[in-house]
Image (cartoon, rainbow, N blue to C red):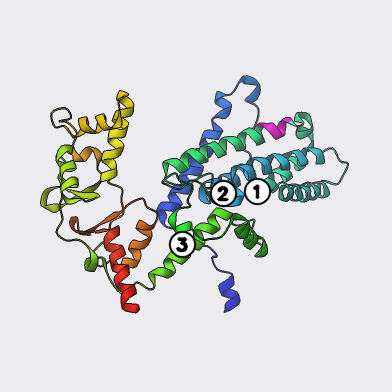
Amino acid sequence: MRILRSLGPAVPRAGLREALRAGLGVLAALAGLSLVPLLAPQELRQVSWLLPPFGATALLLFAVPSSPLAQPWSALVGNMLAALIGVAATHLPLDPGLRVALAVGLAVVAMILARAVHPPAGAVAMMTALAPEPVRQLGVWVVLMPVGLGTLALVALAAGYARLTGRHYPARQFEAPNPHRTADAAPPERLGLTEDELTGILTRTRQALNLGVEDLARLVGAAELQAATHRTGPMTAAEIMSRDLITVQPETPLTEVAALFRRHRFTSLPVVGAEGRFLGVIFQIHLILRAQADATRADRGFAAAARRLMDPKRAPGVLAADLMAVAIPRVSPQTPIAALLPMMADGRVDAVPVLQGQAITGIVTRTDLIAALARQTLREG
């Protein structure tokens, strides 16, 4: 039974949305690459830009963009090294089968030594070694075009597509700037482990080709955060949320929003429509960023821009709807507070609305969550 289980899928189940995101990205990238001959100069139109290995390269870049095997250095250097070795192999007086085996084997050695392992590059070496006559005619140009330029185009398309679809490509580096652009690691990733220590873990467990250092840091941090949720008990959002809400409407002037922030000392205000229907949240930081942007555009001081923004006579057209955030996490009253921890841990939001259907019934702030965790700790003590 254990043997049969080991033959099953080794990756977690992915949703239809993620599958379509990856598939559409590959489709668009390869379709775009197929149009290159139509736009290229006459002398380049005879070159085949849709190389078979590019299908595998596109799969890695769009479906598993965080993999070390899919990063720009691995893809570009790996494919070009393999092409160069394949070109060299075509000049050897060997049996075709032996020539292909030698080209692929040497390509693997070269990629590992260059820290540029990219599985589709094995097919690049095989493809070039299998076509000695046309490859010898083109020579090293095969390495640059279409292999090099084609791979570079796929990498550029993958980076743009990732940004459009909310992914990260190339993968974030270890100790990259956090969302606040300070030197501290993001809160979930403050492990107390150095990059060398994490690299040592990957090397000892022979996972260096499967996982990047930054990914390992994020996974360890996520695991620690998940473990912490086991100690929060059965409390739900309904038990800790603020219920007596101060809300604004989309057409509420920004001057009134600012006055509510000052009066109640809140850092966030829900925006609601008819019958309490939740529309979004306006955070205090949004006012600061708006004033900062106005100061930059008008080449005036920040304080002057802020005063102008809060003056109903000078800024009558600025409304809550102009600044509210819509794409934020939201939960139901029955959501366990364990699920709220990762939502607020990265610092992107400091309040999560609690919805019953489309209507807002409460809001959980970071202060509410800290107070609940403190009470839980006191009970356990």
Question: In the image, what residue occupies the spot 60% across and 51% down?
Answer: 68
Specify whether residue 143 is painted magenta: yes
> Who is closer to the viewer here, 87 or 245?
245
In the image, which residues are magenta? Answer: 141-145
Q: Residues within 10 Å of mark 2 (few under 14, many from 20)?
A: many
Residues packed near mark 1 inside 10 Å, few (<14), some (14 to 19) or many (20 plus) = many
Quadrant of the rendering where the N terminus is positioned: bottom right
The residue identified by callout 1 is 118
Query: Which image quarter: residue 204?
Result: bottom right
Q: Relative to 334, does residue 304 appear above or below in the rendering?
A: above
Q: Kindly report the distance in space between the C-alpha atoms of the residues bearing marks 2 and 3.
A: 24 Å
Q: Residue furthest right?
A: 93
- Comparing labels 3 and 1, the label whose residue is closer to the camera: 3
Marks 2/1 in contact by CB < 8 Å: the verdict is yes
Residue situated in front as seen by the camera: 161 or 304: 304
Asked which secondary structure carries label 3, the reply is helix
The location of residue 70, given as percent across then percent down, is: 59, 48
Q: Which kind of residue does numbered mark 3 sit on?
A: Ala
Q: Which residue is mark 3?
A: 222
Q: Amino acid at mark 2?
A: Leu
Residue bearing the label numbered 2: 60
339 to 52, vertically: above or below: below
Name the mark nearer the viewer: 2 or 3.
3
Give the residue drawn at x 72%, y 41%: 81
Mark 1: amino acid: His
Residue 288 in the image, given as x and y percentages of width and height: 28, 39
